[in-house]
Image (spheres, grey):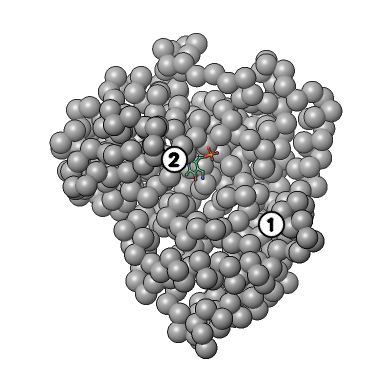
Amino acid sequence: MNKAAGSHFWDVDGNRYVDYLGAYGPIITGHAHPHVTRAIQEAAANGTLYGTPTELEITLAKMLKSAIPSMDKVRFVNSGTEAVMTTIRVARAYTKRNKIIKFAGCYHGHSDLVLVAAGSGPSTLGIPDSAGIPTSIAHEVITVPFNDAGALQAALNKWGDDVAAVMVEPIVGNFGMVMPKEGFLEDLCRLARQYGALVIYDEVITAFRLHYGSAQTFNGLANHEAIQPDLTALGKIIGGGLPIGAYGGSKEVMEQVAPLGPAYQAGTMAGNPASISAGIACLEVLREEGVYPEMERLAVKLTNGLADSASRYGIPLTINRIAAAFSTHFCDHPVTNYEEAQDTDSDLFAAFFRAMLNRGVNLAPSKYEAWFLTTAHTDEDIDFTLEAAEASFREISGK
Ligand code: PMP
């Protein structure tokens, strides 16, 4: 691809695609949104990097804090990976413990500690998911199934004294869009605290994706008070398409971070005025009245059409839609955890992906990734996409 605008991008041969990848999430206002572009241009003209704090950082931090109240204090970094990595360090510093519990299929960036898969048995320590990660590091991580409070309880029974944090995507975006079952986050927070561990929410995808706020305050989840984390990691949307990450939490926990506390974190590029300006501009667009309901209206129309079309050709399709983000699973069972997301037809997904690409629709190139609507998508885009889907389902069904 070499050019993008609004809900579309174009490849080097000049072919146009309707884009539902949204660069894996950040591009929620569409490509090259004029307000965001202007903010980046103005920031660039004022100098892209100072190495000193700026008022812009304070503005964005206040916007984050008012939308995500559990974040008393915020630090900016350069990516979601860095944000997550640092929340783990802070949790370890605060608890003086080493181990982390995470959930199978949740993705938390590419740092050593979180690129670890479940061990072979139900109650074993982790194994590295990539070459270059020492087994000794993987052994600091315990992976349990999402939506399974019993498994979390069992892991805490066994290792609770050394668990610094339970880390989760509170609404999952990395093995499809998956809601926590009723009571799961409440149980997770209660159990973690019972064993003296902190709760870390990775909201790199979910923050500002589902509404102007995060999963912690999403009206699709009840009982917000009982599901507040100690630390939150952010990225993607809060940088409006430029590199960014942020983490934050309660004042007491965040005071572990140097220079106030003993946990070191720094970054030459962190809080750079261009990324911060793009983030502020993006959130300004998103907080306008009616933006999220309109994206959701289009997502409902699109998912209804996809479901109808797939069923016309006898193709099993489970769609998990949460607000204006959704995932399509080629299977005839619900998808509530990673195992169920794996147990879907990869060949059918690959054929569908290619058929759609050939018809000018760009989806995420993985059966585990979501479709994201943006403020730039229109009814015309949805109609175009549904026509492409009808033809694609017909092609892959062989009918
Ligand atoms: N956490 C989650 C939930 C993510 O989806 C991602 C990226 N897909 C990351 C962390 C890592 O963010 P980045 O790619 O900016 O390092």
| Quarter of the image where one finds residue 90 | top left
Eye-nearest disc, 1 or 2: 2
Cβ–Cβ under 8 Å for marks 1 and 2: no
Residue at 15% across, 37% down: 157
Can residue 70 be seen in the rendering of this structure? no
Residue at 77% across, 52% down: 3
Residue at 56% across, 58% down: 364
**Is 161 in front, or is 342?**
342
Beta carbon of the mark 2 residue lies under 8 A of ligand 1:
yes
* Above/below status of 218 relative to 269: below
* Above/below status of 49 relative to 365: above
Residue under numbered circle 1 = 375
**Is 242 in front, or is 91?**
242
Give the side of residue 24 with respect to residue 330, left or right: right
Element class at badge 2: loop
Extreme-left residue of the structure: 158
Q: Residue 3 shows which numbered tag?
A: none
| Quarter of the image where one finds residue 202 | top left
Answer few, some or many: residues within 10 Å of disc 2's Cα (few below 14, many 20 plus, some between 14 and 19).
many
Label 1 amino acid?
Thr
Answer few, some or many: residues within 10 Å of disc 1's Cα (few below 14, many 20 plus, some between 14 and 19).
many
Q: Earlier in the sequence, mark 1 or mark 2?
A: 2
The percent coordinates of residue 166 (x first, y second) are 32, 37
* Above/below status of 375 relative to 232: below
Can residue 272 be seen in the rendering of this structure? yes
**What is the spatial separation of the Cα atoms under label 1 and label 2, in whole angstroms?**
26 Å
Residue under numbered circle 2 = 108
Label 2 amino acid?
His
Q: How many marks?
A: 2
Element class at badge 1: loop
Residue at 68% across, 32% down: 276
* Above/below status of 143 relative to 368: above
